[in-house]
Image: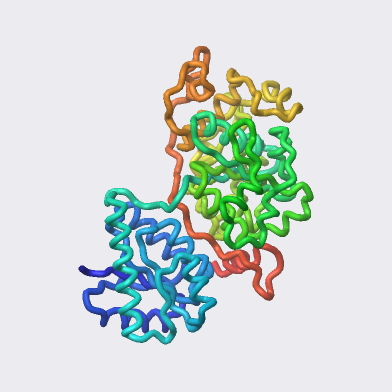
Amino acid sequence: MTTRILPAAGDPDAARAISTLLSQLPAAEPAAPVPDSASLLDTLGRLAAESVDELPEVVLVHERIGPVPALDLIREVALRFPAVGVVLLSSDTGPALFSAAMDSGARGLVGLPPSYEEVAARVQAAAQWAAGVRRHLGRPAEAPTGPGGRVVTVAGAKGGVGTTFTAVQFALAAAAAGRRTALVDLDLQAGDVGSYLDVQFRRSVADLVGIQDISPRVLQDAVYDDRTGLALLLAPADGERGEEVDDRTARHVVAALRSRYELVVIDCGTQVTGANAAAVEGADVAVLVTTPDVVSVRATKRMVRMWERLQVRKAEDTAVVVNRWSKHTEIQPALIEKITKTRVVRTPVPAAFKELQAVVDAGRVQDLDNRSTVKQALWTAAADLGLLAAPATGPEHPAAVAAGTAPGAAAPPAPGSAVAVRTPGPVARLRRGAGDRGALGPWLRRSREH
């Protein structure tokens, strides 16, 4: 059997040495080395979208790969592409690193400089393991996406556009449709998810800081099981504690939630921090909420450009929900799509705050009437984004109302442009370097280099 090998090394000299060594292995088919973590994850995602059989059996990760640290990258590959065996190349072969590599999902560790015998043995073992996993999966036409469900982030172009309300309604719609749903508040300094749902809970996402392996029991202690059926992970009550939540914590939290819930909805607020930027970058669906006015559309364009400069998300991979829309508005969704180069969700949300005022003031948006045009539009937008399952529902079920099939429900608009939904992209390295200031230090360096 031919073993396909994909090396990932940022150092050109190391990449050449690895390629030369791999070319000497019998029955091996080495691919051209990829220079960074983003290229590796994009390549694997593209191959997996075609078929599991298109994935390489073995991936070699050099210790100096970037921008994502090697162990974090191995963890990402192991979670998203479990049918691939990953081998770490490192100058440190001590027991501490070996244990950390195994915990991250590596199938072997090769010392640097690599020897022919060691590389051959580790590659063969990883390839045999990958072949066994693929036989066990028995679904060659489906791409493994790792354990758990999908992640959708909801961010606001600016304050006051309805970001949190949209995130809450998306989560409620998914729960009503029968999906096990978690709602996370990553608006770390000004999170209002608890206020919208009339929830007070002593635990928050800040309590998960510093925990490398978030077990189900640890996660359960931090999550509040609401009577609406949602699992809530709230922002810290003391806003200054939000600075404790960095990109590494966000990645670990999202991975833990993804493994336990069918859908994870994350309210990212309107500020770009290391934590919520990491969540946006790794999300299956990234939603940006805006309103049809000049200031908000400019803010939308500004946010999209920032995400692109920081290599968080491409404009074409971003879905935009237009809130407070009316047919008399001069700025229509098609114009917003053209200006921002994003994909606007085909169902705009009407301007009808009077429907919401009572439940918002009471802090019980879960009690919003099914006949609300705002609720119908948001739940239909959730369906447009693929967030809802399709269980059998009666004509009075909230999901039926949102879909426009209940008596008196408004019919959804004619289909527009499809919403771009991508495979989870590369997770940027957001750690603070020794000379960096602020949670976005490495990202700012990356944007200046481009």
Is residue 436 left or right of 212 when viewed as pictured? right
Q: Quadrant of residue 107?
A: bottom left
Is any atom of residue 322 visible in this view? no
Viewer-nearest residue: 255 or 433: 255
Is residue 170 left or right of 122 when viewed as pictured? right
Viewer-nearest residue: 136 or 76: 136
Name the residue rendered at 73%, 58% in the picture. Answer: 243
Viewer-nearest residue: 258 or 45: 258
Quadrant in which the N terminus appears: bottom left
Is any atom of residue 423 visible in this view? yes
Q: Quadrant of residue 134?
A: bottom left
Q: Can you give x and y, in whole percent of width and height, for residue 17 in the image? A: 37, 84
Name the residue rendered at 62%, 67% in the picture. Answer: 431
Name the residue rendered at 51%, 32% in the picture. Answer: 381
Q: Can you give x and y, in whole percent of width and height, for residue 110 in the image? A: 41, 79
Q: Can you give x and y, in whole percent of width and height, for residue 240 in the image? A: 78, 55
Q: Which residue reaches farthest top?
A: 407
Please determine whether, in this image, residue 171 is positioned above or below residue 276: above
Q: Quadrant of residue 359?
A: top right
Please determine whether, in this image, residue 80 is positioned above or below residue 328: below
Viewer-nearest residue: 109 or 303: 109
Quadrant in which the C terminus appears: bottom right
